[in-house]
Image (cartoon, rainbow, N blue to C red):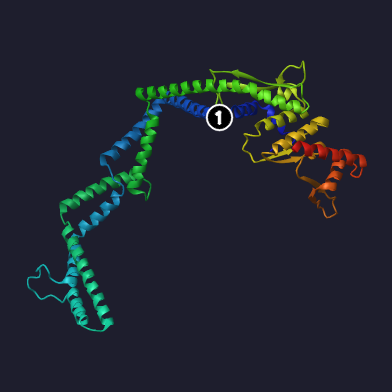
Amino acid sequence: MHGQTDQLRLSRPAEQRRALDRYAGPEHLAALESYREAHDRWRAAVADLERRQTQARELAQAAEVLRHGLEEIEAVAPEPGEDEVLATQVKRLSDADALRAAADEARLALVGDVTGDLGGEEAPQDATAALAIAERSLAGSDDPTLVMLAQDLADAVAVVSDVAGQLAGYVADLDADPARLAEVLDRRALITGLVRKYADVGEGVGGVLAWAADAAQRLAQLDVSDEALAQLAAERDAARAEVDALGAEISAGRRSAAEGFAAEVGRELAGLAMKSARVSFSIDSHPDEPGPEGIDTVALLLAAHPGAPARPVHKGASGGELSRVMLAIEVVFAGADPVPVMVFDEVDAGVGGQAAGEIGRRLARLARQHQVVVVTHLAQVAAFADTHLVVDKSPDTGAGVTATDIRAVEDDDRVRELARMLSGLADSDTGQAHARELLAVAAEARG
């Protein structure tokens, strides 16, 4: 987006440096990104080291609190979900006799006294025997339906036998050992104490482990031992060495690109009726004061005419010249810029005559690789467009509403519109002749 005063971007050194970096190419931009990352690491290490050195006592006290908590948790060494497992074990051990009786009664009802535990006492008929009798009663029938039901009963016998086996295993695994119950209760008490100290309500052992992980990370940042400070200082120095190396590489890349960039922009300016203008870059390096974008202060300089000193572009150019410098830069970047749509709002402000026609020619060149939308009052620029839209405002009809209409003009309508833009007289023969000439020149230039 290029607004009516958008060329003022060029007055900002950061924008001028950014334009030069873009021109220097993708490898340069990749090195610049690496530099930014190294600079961030360096600054973070410097700040962290200063913090630890100036707040050593407070950090040591905070570290001691975290260290005590971690030691307490490590001594118990809870496992994820262990509190829930222990609760289940306590309930099972406490209710072992009642659980065994219930399981035995259910197993007896399913398969009878297969272990002889009843000592010969008469036991009620079990489910397996009853199902087997029913299955045998139906199996000898020739009726397909009864045969199918007999098979279902046989499957039921298998299911009941399987359940009975699982009940027997459950009873065998039940532990009614009071010593084991006491051991589980003690373990549960230890873990409950940790949960109360280090976990929020409802988090359980998971909250304790999360606190421990966070505490270990914070403890590493609070370490003020000589070893920790020495390691951090080494990290700072290594990051600074990388900053210095990349900063020098980027500065060299900028200086190498500056000459070519200035030459290309100068050639474009020559075609924009600024043949005598000279563009250059001033690059001052400060390796002892690396910033987030490198070690250079970059300034785009313009000598607008012979004999004029090279001055910062916003001081050495008029409004119209600034517009042309900005457009020249965009044309230089046209092939490499991924932006699909460019909008220019009166980029031709302060420009007229031959320079206006050359601006139109450059905008048409940009349109070969981008969608270009231009707002202009100059016929010399509008003539180069592939599509010409006219914006009209209707007068207030008394209802307090002004309507705006946008319409496309073609052929004779476009000729009349260009004539109106040139002379204010849409039906002037001279104006229309001039308009047709502009359209012809533009059509030839566009190829």
The residue shown at (83%, 47%) is 411
The x, y position of residue 187, in whole percent, is 24, 47
Q: Residue farthest to the left?
A: 120
Q: Quadrant of residue 264?
A: top right
The x, y position of residue 400, in whole percent, is 82, 53
In depth, the one of 262 and 401 nearer the eye is 262
Q: Residue farthest to the top?
A: 307
Q: Residue farthest to the right?
A: 429
The residue shown at (65%, 22%) is 299
The residue shown at (42%, 26%) is 52
Residue 59 is left or right of residue 332, and the answer is: left
Q: Is residue 378 visible?
A: no
In depth, the one of 283 and 427 nearer the eye is 427
Residue beneath label 1, please?
29
Q: Is residue 85 visible?
A: yes
Q: Quadrant of residue 68?
A: top left
The quarter in which the C terminus is drawn is top right
Residue 423 is left or right of residue 108, and the answer is: right
Task: Please determine whether, in this image, residue 144 is positioned above or below residue 76.
Answer: below
Q: Amino acid at mark 1?
A: Leu
Residue 244 is left or right of residue 325, and the answer is: left
In depth, the one of 131 and 124 nearer the eye is 131
The quarter in which the N terminus is drawn is top right
The x, y position of residue 307, in whole percent, is 77, 15
* Label 1 packing within 10 angstroms: few (<14), some (14-19), many (20+): some
The x, y position of residue 398, in whole percent, is 85, 54
- Count every numbered label the image shows and give the total: 1
Task: Please determine whether, in this image, residue 123 is positioned above or below residue 211.
Answer: below
Q: Quadrant of residue 295?
A: top right
Helix, strand or loop under label 1: helix
